[in-house]
Amino acid sequence: MAHEEFDAVVVGSGFGGAVSCHRLAQAGWRVCLLERGRRWPPGSFARTPAAFGKNFWDPSERQFGLFDIWSFKRLDAVVGSGLGGGSLIYANVLIRKDEKWFVREPAVKNHGHHGHREYWPVQRADLERHYDEVERVLRPVKYPLEHPHFDHIVKTRALLRSGRAVGLEAELLPLAVSFGNDPQRPIPGEQLHDGGNLHGLPRSTCRLCGECFLGCNFGSKNTLDLNYLSMAERLGAELRDLSEVTALRRADSGGGFELEYVRHQPDEERPRGYRPEPRKLRCKKLVMAAGTVGSSYLLLKHRDALGLTSPMLGEKVGGNGDALMFATGCRDEQGRALDVRADLGPTITAAIRRADALDGDGASGRGAYVEEASVPPFLAWLGEFALPWKVVPNLARFAWLAWRSRRKDADLSYEVSQLLGDARLSSGLLPLLCMGRDVADGRFSLSGKWLDCDWSAGASQEFFDGVRGIAAAVADKLGGQLVENPAGLLGRSTTVHPLGGCTMGDDAGSGAVDPWGRAFGAEDLVVADGSVMPGATGPNPSLTIAALANRFAEHLVEGGRPK
């Protein structure tokens, strides 16, 4: 096979890959981006049962969908697969990592791979202007709660009210969502004037459908394919979707790297077991941005072929303290049943913040954020109809009312209206997404040809107990009860923010990459995704990942275009 030659190849198109690709193309580099997933233009995201059944990523089973679910011994991770990476399914929240949460704990002798030391070689001051640059592109704005077109979102007001009632900070969050062409005049469903995107399709402002985390069919989310990747393509970068990297190694001559990848062809008529022919690329600089799980797996698998020297590769894995809980049976301030209407609005609009001992204001423990979430209408219907203890009594009551009514007249309108009962399960339910500064003491390793993860909630138990206490207090202030994810009670955690595995450090003994993302043992290889985090970000990590990628790419560009 002949090699195609590029100055740089970027593997992955999430917050690290998209920013890196754009910065390198902007500098005049010849760049190729490889993304294993497909393109997801507005209008293509699954909503029907048939489409959802195929909306998962497993090429071996001829599935090329949006969601990729990894399940390890005690940790599950949900990540995205598509051009735009995690931005396609994230909840749009862009928060800067708290300045005092850039921890620099002293070294601990013989701490081993389960050591709890957290050390950030990069500080908030190093990232400020990179945060600024990313925000100029992603354009985060706070939810316009006081505007007449947007002031009816009950779940937002419920979270703010309950958070303040328990004595904690509660505020609206900056969201990468377009609410109006003029931020001062937001209008739902208005056509956006954004100058075009790589899909060549129109976009509209947010319609408050509550479906952000399923993929926005209206293009209202400022996902990476609609900005960074569109700009990179206009600058000449080659964006190759459905292109999954299978091999990495140093080039035999001339320096740089060689990659092999396969081009997936989602054709349901292809026989099971079909294997596409591998293709080859060669580049001087390689940017790994396949996500925490993807990059860790590829680098562990090809550690020797790439010449990686750090024993820390695979270490310090965590889930950013993610936990999902529910406030059920919510009531208003007068004690009446509260229809939370969690189907309305962006997935997340506001957060309650618990202070950290590092803040220096007398708080103790590790900091956390609790954010409200949405329940798309079809999930609410599913909840009301799928639970036997809800359905059976309602059907029995309907049968009794119908029998009684037919003895008098043939009009069953009222009886049919009672089939759902009071629908309190869905109307009074508020999902609570919790995250924060957990202990990143997990470890990725290879088990044969598969990735494994050794992680336990034990070191973070105090943190999770504290988060549970906040959620319980919120539910109580809303007149409801707290329902936890049953998996959490069994010592399992499900994260949508996996971090670590290729963490930053000052040397090969403390990290897999240096403060500029360069891999120890292979400085022309830069890692730019959530895997470089040496600990939890605390809040949603997307903005910090993008800012770090901008910093790393800037440093690459300053070294000059490869010859």
Image: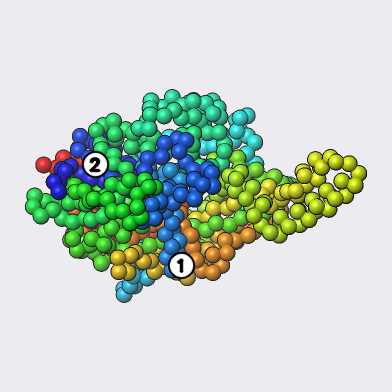
Q: Is residue 213 above or below residue 218?
A: below
Q: Is residue 267 left or right of residue 422?
A: left
In the figure, residue 5 lies in which quadrant? top left
Q: Secondary structure at mark 2?
A: strand
Instruction: Name the outermost residue toward the right.
Output: 408
* Closer to us: 465 or 348: 348
- Residue 176, given in percent of the width and then of the height, sits at 46, 38
> Which residue lies under the disc numbered 1?
74
Q: Amino acid at mark 2?
A: Cys
Residue sitting at 62 percent across and 39 percent down?
Answer: 153
Q: Residues within 10 Å of mark 1 (few under 14, many from 20)?
A: some
Residue sitting at 32 percent across and 51 percent down?
Answer: 290
Which image quadrant: the C terminus?
top left
Instruction: Name the outermost residue toward the bottom.
Output: 110
Residue 25 visible in this rendered orientation of the protein: yes
Residue sitting at 63 percent across and 34 percent down?
Answer: 151
Q: Amino acid at mark 1?
A: Arg
Q: Is residue 502 above or below residue 332?
A: below
Label annotation for residue 360 = none
Label annotation for residue 32 = 2
